[in-house]
Amino acid sequence: RKIRYIKQCKLPGKPDFFIKKLNRAVFVNGCFWHMHKCYKFKMPKSNVLFWKNKLKTNKERDIKNCKKLRNKGIKVLNVWECNLERIKLYAR
């Protein structure tokens, strides 16, 4: 069965995919850039203040955009890099 989706749509946060029929926004997030609490995220040891501010801002922006989408009645799905890695292992 095929699922039709829109790439790079003009919604808050610019979801990676939007499934119009299901009214669902999908974000594929890198664990480092979005501070996911998993084994893939490690805070850099150099220029710590810059990275803390940068990554904190990214996370706050993600939360704000998800709220905007939910207020529009759109369901949000976050797919994490570490989860995709596990899926790839099972697919072999």
Image: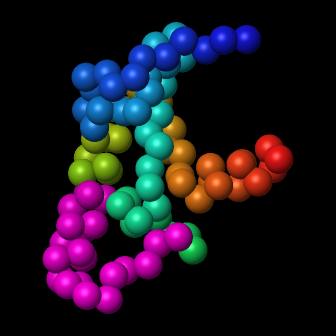
Please tell me in which quadrant of the rendered image residue 27 appears. top left
Indicate whether residue 72 is drawn in magenta.
no
Drawn side of residue 8 relative to residue 27, left or right: left
Please tell me in which quadrant of the rendered image residue 14 appears. top left
Residue at the front extreme, as displayed: 92
Kindly tell me whether residue 71 is visible in this rendering: no
Please provide percent x and percent y for residue 24. 48, 25
Display coloring = rainbow
Residue at 40 percent across and 33 percent down: it is 16
Please provide percent x and percent y for residue 30. 44, 55
Please tell me in which quadrant of the rendered image residue 55 appears. bottom left
Residue at 25 percent across and 87 percent down: it is 46
* Number of residue marks: 0
Drawn side of residue 22 relative to residue 83, left or right: left
Q: Quadrant of the N terminus?
A: top right
Residue closest to the eye, 91 or 77: 91
Residue closest to the eye, 62 or 68: 62
Please provide percent x and percent y for residue 62. 31, 49
Residue at 21 percent across and 67 percent down: it is 54
Residue at 54 percent across and 45 percent down: it is 79
Chief secondary structure of the magenta portion: helix
60 over 56 or under it: above or below:
above
Question: What's the magenta region?
Answer: 40-60
49 over 6 or under it: above or below:
below
Please provide percent x and percent y for residue 57. 21, 61
Indicate whether residue 57 is drawn in magenta.
yes
